Amino acid sequence: MMAMRAHQSDVGLISRLPPTRGRYLEQADLSRFSRFRVGGPAEVLFRPADPDDLQQFMTNTPPEIAVTVIGVGSNILVRDGGVAGVVVRLGQGFDDIVVDGTHVRASAGALDLNVARTAQENAITGLEFLSGIPGTIGGTLRMNGGAYGREIGDITVAATILDRKGELSVLDRANLDFSYRHCGVAEDRIFVAAELAGAEGSPQKIAERMDEIAANRVESQPTRGATGGSTFKNPPGQKAWKVIEEAGCRGLKRGGAMVSEKHCNFLVNAKQASANDLETLAEEVRQRVFENSGIELEWEIRRIGDAEVRE
């Protein structure tokens, strides 16, 4: 379906949206933007041209219209019924990375890997772990994502946030309320950029650490194929993969979905799975783990949209 601007259409939701320099697309296939390669359509997909375009959109969009933000879709499961309202995808125009001394300012759509590489090229250490997170800065901030012993909250100086009224604010680390896989910023706020702090380091040693992280990911995670990030948070004092394995779930299948044989805290779209296959399988894993150990696993993957497919 051809993209269109709001003022070019007088039907449906698009007619209620403001003019934009970006693009609107009705009934956009969101499976294209999810690493699981599943999910229904967005009622309207909006790809803003840049932060100013997004700000104007938020300023002029009626508050009753639901707005959902996605990046590269590495940590989301889009349900089969799709997502009502507007899905905002931050891509080109949101990938700036600027270095100032040992600080790195990254826009929300910048890939974590690219931020780590930029830091390495500028002899800044402390950001290597970002190379092990297959997402964008905005999504990593939203969930206080982490890998290899560090979280983005450990290195965040401040973040720029856009609210539903189109107003920008800058919050320092203390006011971002980071905890394990959690950020206290309200869900209807959008991360626009972040300032991250590193330290002076050796480009060679930084590169060596990033190579170690890359090799570890390939060896221990299903990095090839249709999969997301870690499905469940680690329970206090435990590893999610371990309690899943102890419950006999490694390799478990439901429909086209499977618990990874390589790392059983990852789900895999093994054979034309639906989102329902993946979510049903994950809930069965949660039930089996609870029955085996009394541990209630919490979702780390963000599930969006409606389960029921609309006719």
Image (cartoon, rainbow, N blue to C red):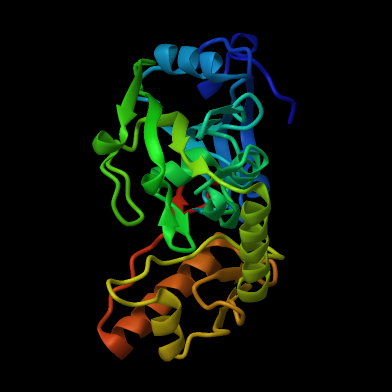
- Counting from the top left corner in percent of width and height, residue 117 is at 65, 44
Q: Is residue 230 left or right of residue 223?
A: left
On the image, which quarter does residue 257 sit in?
bottom right
User: Which of these two is toward me, 226 or 273?
Assistant: 226
Q: Residue at x 54, y 84 (%)?
A: 252
Q: Quadrant of residue 95?
A: top right
Query: Which quarter of the picture shows residue 120?
Result: top right
Image point 53% across, 29% down: which residue? 101
Q: How many marks?
A: 0
Locate residue 260, reporting x and y percent.
59, 77
Q: Residue 307, can we see it?
A: no
Q: Look at the picture and state if 156 lies above or below 131.
A: above
184 displayed left or right of 97: left
Question: Where's residue 63, x and y in %?
Answer: 34, 21
For the point 25% across and 34% down, which residue is it?
Answer: 175
At a point 39% along the width and 16% down the height, the residue shown is 166
Left or right side of 232 for 295: left
Q: Position of residue 152 (x, y in %)?
A: 43, 47
Asked if one can make out residue 90 in the rendered structure from this viewpoint, the answer is: yes
Quarter placement of the N terminus = top right
